[in-house]
Image (cartoon, grey):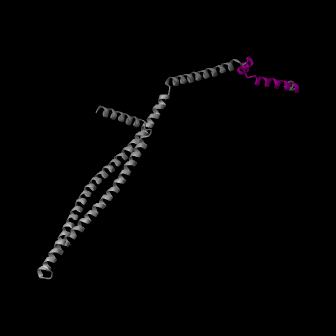
């Protein structure tokens, strides 16, 4: 007894290991459904064959019943002929007896066919029950397959998302953001420094020219010189 228990445990462990090693449960389920459909096809074929045998047995039963009734009628007719004097009594009795023997054989054959038809009907009922169970199993597993496919899609999407989230290093992300912030601050300071240098590099002349507009004064002096050369100042 203990040996059988150990063997059962070993077989159970191997079965669980095989299930764990399944790479694609969807394909395995689809294969299982295909196998059940093949079983359904075989059961339907067997059902058709058993129904054919049942029909044949019932036909045989009717045929032997008709024969038995025919032999019975012949025996009656023969006895009536002997009663009317159309046939010798001994000959009539012999023929009637043979007819009754044939009737008895036909009755036995009819009973045999009836029993066979009854057994076939029982087999038909069992096959039809099995077929209904297979159809129900196929329908249930097809629904399970649709659910399984949806669950696999969701689980794969969730797994990929979690994997991506797991691969993200929060500390490195914060460090990168801090470096970017420091880089921007450095660029801003550098721009301000260049502005200060540009402002301090202006000459004093540039500052004076910026403070006083000498263009108009120079134009006045040039006008006076021109008038002096033309002698216009004396006339004035």
216 falls in the magenta region: yes
Quarter of the rendering occupied by the N terminus? top left
Query: Residue visible at 57% across and 21% down?
Result: 182
Q: Position of residue 93 (x, y in %)?
A: 14, 75
Examine the residues drawn in magenta and state their main secondary structure.
helix
Q: Position of residue 7 (x, y in %)?
A: 34, 34
Residue that extends furthest to the front in the rendered view of this protein? 90
Name the side, left or right, on which 176 lies relative to 77.
Answer: right
Find residue 95 and report its image quarter: bottom left
Q: Residue 75: tell me if it is visible.
A: no
In this rendering, is residue 112 above or below 5?
below
Find residue 51 and report its image quarter: bottom left
Query: Residue visible at 29% across and 61% down?
Result: 53
In this rendering, is residue 87 above or below 230?
below
Find residue 47 and report its image quarter: bottom left
Q: Which residues are magenta?
A: 203-230
199 falls in the magenta region: no
Q: Residue 196: tell me if it is visible.
A: yes
Query: Residue visible at 77% across and 23% down?
Result: 217
Q: Position of residue 58 (x, y in %)?
A: 25, 64
Quarter of the rendering occupied by the C terminus? top right
In this rendering, is residue 168 above or below 97?
above
Q: Position of residue 116 (x, y in %)?
A: 25, 59
Name the side, left or right, on which 35 lies relative to 124.
Answer: right
Name the side, left or right, on which 1 lies relative to 232.
Answer: left
Query: Residue visible at 35% across and 56% down?
Result: 45
Q: Which is nearer the eye, 12 or 130?
A: 12
Name the side, left or right, on which 226 lies relative to 92.
Answer: right
């Amino acid at each position: 007894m203990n040996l059988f228990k150990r063997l059962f445990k070993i077989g159970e462990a191997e079965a669980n290991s095989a299930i764990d090693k399944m790479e694609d449960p969807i394909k395995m389920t689809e294969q299982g459904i295909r196998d059940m459909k093949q079983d359904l096809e075989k059961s339907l074929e067997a059902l058709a064959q058993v129904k054919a045998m049942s029909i044949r047995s019932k036909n045989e039963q009717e045929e032997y019943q008709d024969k038995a009734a025919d032999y019975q009628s012949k025996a009656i007719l023969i006895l009536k002929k002997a009663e009317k004097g159309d046939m010798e009594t001994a000959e009539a009795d012999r023929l009637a007896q043979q007819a009754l023997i044939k009737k008895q054989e036909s009755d036995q054959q009819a009973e045999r066919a009836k029993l066979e038809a009854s057994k076939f009907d029982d087999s038909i009922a069992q096959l039809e029950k099995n077929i209904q169970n297979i159809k129900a199993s196929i329908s249930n597993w097809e629904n399970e397959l649709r659910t399984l496919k949806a669950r696999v899609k969701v689980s794969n999407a969730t797994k990929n998302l979690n994997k991506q989230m797991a691969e993200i290093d929060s500390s490195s992300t914060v460090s990168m953001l801090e470096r970017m912030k420091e880089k921007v601050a450095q660029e801003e300071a550098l721009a301000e420094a260049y502005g200060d240098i540009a402002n301090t590099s202006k000459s004093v002349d540039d500052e004076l020219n910026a403070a006083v507009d000498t263009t108009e004064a120079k134009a006045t002096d040039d006008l006076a010189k021109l008038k002096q050369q033309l002698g216009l100042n004396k006339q004035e």
